[in-house]
């Protein structure tokens, strides 16, 4: 069902026949899944198809973590290894991949975590990080991120050593993008305050452009993604001056 929601999220209204083909399922199965998701308010049914629920442009926080979990974990570990030893201030935007980076840093007690995400802030405190700073603001119910002028004002008061940012899309055409314009502005403030910016994005985000621009590629130092990313788009991002790390696919065990 998460894959079905993701398709609608990326492409808008789609017929059941297309969803069945893309998801390698029967139309009867897709029809049942659509009915269940519609009853939960996660999509709207149309004649012979479905579309994202009105007013909803992204997957809820509780569902996003189930997409590409293995890739996100490996990306997070790679990002954590790039954090220098010793005291360091790390900025973390919201998102499941950024949260995975925090977990990969659980052994560090010399870090200051700066975030506008309630989820990440609470998890960092539970892990016992030396200091956790949560930027206040307006709470977005979908992402549990604090956004807006109050959050941006807080972020402008701090210096971030390394910012770990997620994105709904990253491409040579659109740069770093997200679904919400206010969230984009708040996250851009985090980027502006950072000495180094690492974008963590699984391959499903590469080459995609969503509603609101969060930053130019020129503002990103490093992109970490997985081997499912389109090679031509990776090449264009590298040509823009971004250091790109494509993690190899881990072979399945016997």
Image: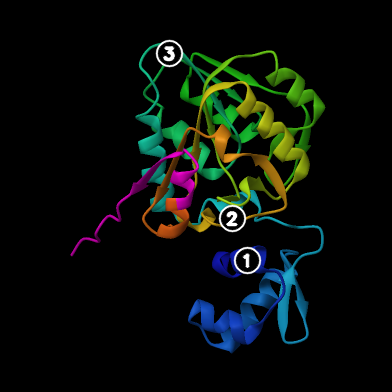
Vertical placement of 17 versus 127: above or below?
below
Q: Determine the CA span between mark 3 and mark 2.
A: 31 Å
Q: Is residue 81 left or right of residue 127?
A: left
Asked if labels 2 and 1 touch by Cβ distance under 8 angstroms, the answer is yes
Q: Determine the CA span between mark 3 and mark 1.
A: 39 Å
Q: Residues within 10 Å of mark 1 (few under 14, many from 20)?
A: many
Q: Is residue 212 left or right of residue 220?
A: right
Magenta-drawn segment: 236-254
Callout 1 secondary element: helix
On the image, numbered disc 1 is attached to which residue? 5
Comparing 40 with 4, the one in front is 4
- List x then y, in percent, for residue 44: 77, 72
- List x then y, in percent, for residue 199: 51, 38
Callout 2 secondary element: helix
Of the image marks 3 and 1, the number of the one nearer the N terminus: 1
- List x then y, in percent, for residue 205: 54, 54
| Quadrant position of the N terminus in the picture | bottom right
Asked if labels 1 and 3 touch by Cβ distance under 8 angstroms, the answer is no
Observer able to see residue 230: no
Vertical placement of 160 versus 22: above or below?
above
Observer able to see residue 172: yes
On the image, numbered disc 2 is attached to which residue? 63
Vertical placement of 214 versus 234: above or below?
above
Q: Residues within 10 Å of mark 2 (few under 14, many from 20)?
A: some
- List x then y, in percent, for residue 69: 44, 52
Of the image marks 1 and 2, the number of the one nearer the N terminus: 1
On the image, numbered disc 3 is attached to which residue? 110
Quarter-of-image position of residue 108: top left
């Amino acid at each position: 069902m998460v894959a079905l929601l993701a398709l609608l999220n990326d492409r808008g209204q789609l017929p059941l026949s297309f969803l069945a083909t893309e998801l390698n399922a029967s139309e009867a199965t897709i029809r049942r899944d659509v009915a269940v998701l519609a009853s939960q308010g996660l999509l709207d049914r149309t004649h012979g198809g479905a579309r994202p629920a009105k007013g909803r442009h992204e997957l809820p926080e509780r569902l996003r973590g189930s997409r590409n979990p293995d890739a996100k974990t490996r990306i997070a570990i790679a990002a954590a290894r790039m954090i220098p030893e010793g005291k360091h201030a790390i900025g973390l935007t919201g998102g499941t991949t950024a949260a995975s980076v925090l977990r990969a840093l659980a052994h560090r007690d010399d870090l200051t975590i700066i975030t506008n995400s309630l989820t990440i802030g609470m998890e960092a405190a539970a892990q016992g990080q030396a200091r956790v700073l949560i930027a206040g603001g307006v709470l977005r119910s979908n992402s549990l991120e604090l956004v807006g002028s109050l959050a941006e004002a807080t972020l402008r008061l701090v210096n971030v050593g390394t910012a770990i940012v997620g994105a709904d899309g990253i491409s040579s055409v659109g740069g770093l993008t997200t679904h919400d314009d206010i969230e984009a502005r708040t996250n851009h403030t985090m980027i502006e305050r950072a000495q180094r910016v690492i974008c963590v994005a699984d391959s499903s985000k590469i080459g995609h452009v969503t509603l609101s621009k969060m930053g130019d590629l020129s503002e990103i130092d490093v992109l970490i993604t997985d081997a499912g990313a389109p090679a031509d788009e990776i090449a264009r991002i590298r040509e823009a001056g971004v250091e790109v790390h494509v993690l190899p696919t881990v072979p399945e065990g016997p």
